[in-house]
Image (cartoon, coloured by chain):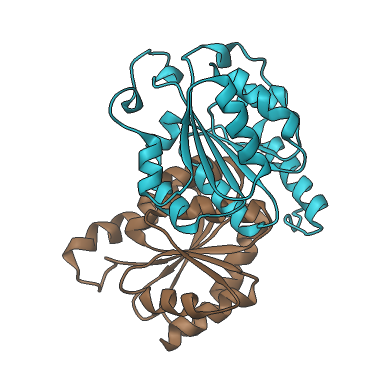
Chain colours: A cyan, B brown
Amino acid sequence: MNRSDCLETLVPHISDQLVVASVSGQWIWGQLCKHEGNLLLGSMGNALGVGVGMALGLPHRKVIVLESDGSVLLSLFNLPTLGSLHLENLAVFVFDNEAYSGSRISRPTATAGKTDLVAMAKDAGVSYAVTVRDLDAFKIEGTLAIKEKGLRFIVAKVEETLEHRKAERSDMDLVENKYRFVRYIERTEDKSVFLGRG
Amino acid sequence: MKNARKILQSLKSVGVRLIVSLPDSWLVDLAVLANEDSEVRHLLVANEGDGVAVCGGAWLGGTKSAMLLENSGLLVATYALARFHVTFGVPTLILTSYRGEIGDGNWNLSTMGRVTEPVIKALGLQYLIIRSADDIEEAIKKADRSASGTLLPTVILLGIGSL
């Protein structure tokens, strides 16, 4: 199973959800899904916190966070917040390739060994956390996570590939993406976020 | 407690509806009041990097928030502030106790007193220092106005005499 195949299965379910992607998979996701509700962060370690803040402020909107093993390992401090709040409108997908592939060295991360992100999430208070290892299981869990209420934390064990480096880059820079995202929020929530400058 | 009440009221008056905190002993009254206030949601976090990211995410969804932390925690939050808030232009109102500043006399925090302002400057953030609770309402108004206008975090350093 690779990350791209997993992400493809999510695309048909996207309508008005808000999708926060860490650097993991954002290029692929940005190409697969042109949704205005995509917020592509371009960094590791921030997506879970940002997704929690968004889900807190917009409890009637489903927020989906796309994460990676490296990014979650960098920001494990997010897990107690996730477990304590247990937001009903949040779905977290962690694409775990068990490798430092972003740095182009194929060395195993802690999740290739004894570190179990699902166990860590559960012990932080996340009641629904599962590991999936094949695409059929991912489709089932992915659909439920998006469609159903309740916090879900899905760790997808994916192959290490260099597909993200081959993905076509968007001509939209990430700050432009932020403006598009906020304008989408303003339009769909009928509220002002930007107060205007100039 | 009186000063904490004034700070909370000032935050609410500029539209803050989410307060995220990792309080130290100077900020604990404010955190207690925020916890009891029905007009704001109060969230305690275990790490300030998490806290400021939550505040930024809330803003992107249209909810104004404030982060309360000790200046030691401001250093913890620098990664999220640099990679997320400053890079993208996401405002957050940050109130931090100014531990270790001259007059505090706490050896253990004196390094924080020396590095806090240089770190804020290195991030390119605007800040002001409050030394009297009488100034807090105006400081919060200014910091909020600048955060909203510049789309960057602004920092209020709560010095000795302000809390």
Tell me where residue B58 appears, x and y as whole percent: 60, 55
In front of the other: A124 or B82: A124
Residue shown at 43%/73% (left/top)? Answer: B31
Label total for image: 0
Tell me where residue B158 appears, x and y as whole percent: 41, 71
Q: Is residue A133 above or below residue B125?
A: above
Q: Is residue A100 left or right of residue B64?
A: left
Q: Is residue B61 above or below residue A42?
A: below
Tell me where residue A135 appears, x and y as whole percent: 57, 20
Residue shown at 65%/61% (left/top)? Answer: B63
Most distant residue in the left direction: B107
Q: Is residue A123 left or right of residue A185?
A: left
Residue shown at 46%/38% (left/top)? Answer: A45
In which image quadrant can residue A13 be found? top right
Q: Is residue B72 left or right of residue B77?
A: left
In front of the other: A28 or B52: A28
In front of the other: B152 or A163: A163
* Res B77 seen here: no
Tell me where residue B18 appears, x and y as whole percent: 57, 66
Most distant residue in the bottom direction: B2
In which image quadrant can residue A31 be found? top right
In front of the other: B120 or A94: A94
Residue shown at 56%/81% (left/top)? Answer: B9
Q: Is residue B95 above or below residue A163?
A: below
* Res B122 seen here: yes
